[in-house]
Amino acid sequence: MEIRKLILATIAGLAVMLFLSAVWHGLLMYDFYAAHSPALLSLSFMVASLTVAPPTNDQTLRREAAMAGKKALMVHGGWGGHEPKETVDVFAPLLTEAGFDVTLSDTMDSYLDKDFMQSLSLVVPCWTMGQIEGEQEKGLRQAVESGVGLGGWHGGMCDAFRNSTNYQFMTGGQFVGHPDGIKDYTVNITRADDPIVVGLSDFQMHSEQYYMHTDPGNEVLATTTFDANSAPWVNGTVMPVVWKRMWGAGKVFFSSLGHVATDFEVVEAKEIQRRGLLWAAR
Ligand SMILES: [Zn+2]
C-alpha cells in the first residue's frame, strides 16, 4: 500500500513539474523567441501544449509571433473625409509590432506588381470611393484568390470602387447609407467564441452606423440594430458590422467601424480590427 502511494505521488509530482516547466518555458522565452525565431517559439508552445491546451491569449501570442518577417501592404487614398492615411497610421505600427514588414503605398499600381503581391501575407486597402482600374483590380483579386489575406475597415474597404462588382464580390459587402449621420449606437458581439472577438463585450460607438448590402456567405462576428429617425422603415434591421470570409485561398476580414481615426479610440473597435488583420494574414 505504501509503495503504491509512493509511486502515485512520484507520477503526480513529475506531471506537475513537467506542466510548470512547459508553461514557464513558453511564457518566459516568448520575447526572445519572438525576436529571434518564430519556429522556435512555435516549438516551445508545442511542448507546452503537450501537457496543457493553451488558453486563447496564448493562441493569440503564437499567432502574432508567427507573423515575424511577413509582409503587409497598406494602400491609402480616395475620399479624404475618411482620413485614409491617419487611419492606416493607427494600424501600421500595430502590424510592425506583430512582426510585419509594412509597406505603405498611395497608388493602386502596387497591385500590378505580381511578384511583389505574391510576396505579401496581407493587403489592407484603405481607399474610399474612387475608381480601380481593370488590371489593378485583377492584380489584387488574383493575389487574394491565391492566398494573400485581405483586411480593412469602413469605407476604405467597403465603400470603394462602386463600379467594380468583382471587388465587392471579394470583400463581401458594400456601403449604401448611414441613416442619421453621426449617432450613438451599440455593437453586439454575436460570435463570442471566435478569436477575433473573444473576451469582448457589446460596446457603444458614436459615429456613422453603416447600412450595408452584404454577402449571406459572410461569417458575421458582430452586428448592430437600426433605430433611425431619417429612415424609420429600416428600424429593427440587424446589420452585420464585423465579418470574415474566404476568397479562394485568401482570408478576408472587414469591420464597418472607423469613419475617422479617433473612432479607434474605442478600444474594442481597435482591438477587433487589429485581431482581424492578423487573422487574415497568411
Ligand atoms: Zn464614413
Image (tube, rainbow, N blue to C red):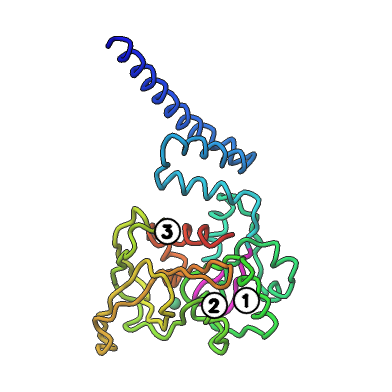
Q: Residue at x 32, y 64 (%)?
A: 189
The answer to which quarter of the image holds residue 208 is bottom left
**Which amino acid type is marked by label 1?**
Arg
Q: Are marks 1 and 2 in contact (CB under 8 Å)?
A: yes
For label 3, the residue is 196
Q: Residues within 10 Å of mark 3 (few under 14, many from 20)?
A: many
Query: Of label 1 and label 3, which has the lower sequence position?
Result: 1
Q: Which image quarter holds the C terminus?
A: bottom right
- Nearest to the observer: residue 232 or residue 206: 232
Q: Which image quarter holds the N terminus?
A: top left
Whether residue 145 is in magenta: the answer is no
Question: Does residue 26 lie above or below 84 as drawn?
Answer: above
Using the image, tell me which numbered label, if any, was put on residue 42. Answer: none
Question: Does residue 172 lie above or below 101 as drawn?
Answer: below
CA gap between label 1 and label 2 equals: 7 Å
**Residue 279 horizontal side relative to residue 2, left or right:** right
Using the image, tell me which numbered label, if any, was put on residue 141. Answer: 1
Chain part drawn in magenta: 73-85
Q: Residue at x 38, y 57 (%)?
A: 267
**Which amino acid type is marked by label 2?**
Met
CA gap between label 1 and label 3 equals: 24 Å
Whether residue 78 is in magenta: the answer is yes
**Secondary structure at numbered mark 2:** helix
For label 2, the residue is 170
The spot of residue 59 in percent (x, y) is: 46, 47
